[in-house]
Amino acid sequence: MRSVSRLSLLLLATTLFLPLAGCTSEANIAPPARPAIVQQPKLATSVVTDTYAGEVRARYESVLGFRIAGKVQSRNVDVGARVHKGDVLAELEPQDAELALSSAQAQVAWAKADVALAKAELDRNRAMLDKHYISQALFDARQNAYDAAAAKLKQAQAQAAVAANQSGYTTLRADADGVITALRFEVGQVLAAGQPAVTLAHDGDMEVAISVPEGRIGVFSPKQPVLVEIWAHDNARQSGTVRELAPEADPTSRTYAVRVTLDDPSKAQLGMTARIYLNAGDQPEALLLPLAALHEKDGKPAVWVVDSRTHAVKLAPVTVGAYREDGVTVTGGIDPKQWVVAAGVHKLSEGQVVAPVDAANKPIKL
């Protein structure tokens, strides 16, 4: 019995010892290197400081409207239609204008009759004055009556000319060759005189219209060279020039309208989306990093720098220049030759060894 008890105690001790030995061996095994996407910062000379989205528009645009009020009788164009100068775009119902013209013409006829009567009276009184049958005062009265009738005739003729012009205003015509970009009415709608009805983009020069925050309008100036990127053409870039800066901000958006002329408008079409890039010549020491590369150390921005020999990471404080849609500019704390972790920075710890890879998950030799 005593030998059986000793055997049981020996087996129990062995059973307790084996798990402890296993835990000790596993604790001494170093964890494998975690893959990390790394990259070197881009030099400021190869990036841009500001990017603005805009729309391709014609340099000259006409907002057309009827010069008289009336009800729309017909519309001959749609948005996107190409028109030529003089083409009829829309028409108002002409009845009111025709009646106004008829009334004005009747006034002219009436005034002509008054003039003829006053002229006959004046001639008779002149003959009677020569024979001293009437006084000079009576003759002067007839002369004044004739002059008043002649003045009323001129007034009636001018009003008839205005009515004739207004009868032509029932037709809205294109004032240049171009493309219809907006219609603000429908058939049957009653429009006021001068109410905007049609927007016509003239053929010719093309521009990109952008809106600039009031805090950045100071970096723009007339004739300033910029880069223009048309999204519809594989993001190919071309040169452009700032042509116009709005003198005041839009009261609603508090942004300034800026127009950029395209040096080669052949590939641009109205309504296309474009980007405007400003050169970074004024910040030669700035570097560009992805936004995902930023971390924090003691409440300040920092990035994980990878040691090229040991592949261990170290948190380095940096000075942030500006946040942009394509990344963040850094003006101090790192240099272009260092390798920086570009993603997953919240999963790293000081001194941790990583396996550097590129964006395509291919190993990189530092």
Image: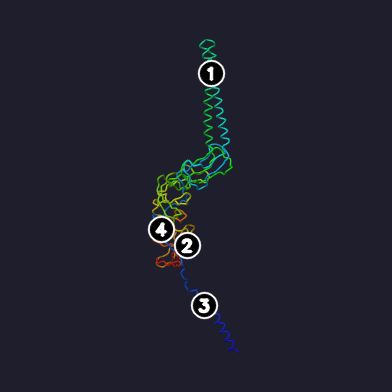
Task: Tell me the crowding category of disc 4: few under 14, some 14 to 19, or many 20 or more residues within 10 angstroms, Cα based.
Answer: some
Q: Amino acid at mark 2?
A: Ala
Task: Tell me the crowding category of disc 1: few under 14, some 14 to 19, or many 20 or more residues within 10 angstroms, Cα based.
Answer: some
Q: Amino acid at mark 4?
A: Lys
Read off the residue under disc 1. Answer: 120
Q: Amino acid at mark 3?
A: Gly
- Image quadrant assignment for residue 357: bottom left
- What is the CA distance from the residue labelled 2 to the residue labelled 1? 103 Å
Looking at the rendered structure, the number of numbered marks drawn on it comes to: 4
Q: Nearer the viewer, residue 189 or 6?
A: 189
- What is the CA distance from the residue labelled 2 to the residue labelled 3? 35 Å
Quadrant containing the N terminus is bottom right
Q: For mark 2, give the secondary structure.
A: loop
- What is the CA distance from the residue labelled 4 to the residue labelled 3? 48 Å
Vertical order, 137 against 92 (above or below): above
Q: Disc 4, disc 2: CB below 8 Å?
A: no
Q: Which of the two discs, 3 and 1, sits closer to the camera? A: 1
Who comes first in sequence, dot 3 or dot 1? Answer: 3
Q: Amino acid at mark 1?
A: Ala
- What is the CA distance from the residue labelled 3 to the residue labelled 1? 137 Å
Who comes first in sequence, dot 4 or dot 3? Answer: 3
Q: Which of the two discs, 2 and 1, sits closer to the camera? A: 1
The image shows residue 213 at horizontal and vertical percentages of 48, 47
Read off the residue under disc 3. Answer: 22
Q: Disc 4, disc 3: CB below 8 Å?
A: no
Q: For mark 4, give the secondary structure.
A: strand
Who comes first in sequence, dot 2 or dot 3? Answer: 3
Read off the residue under disc 2. Answer: 343
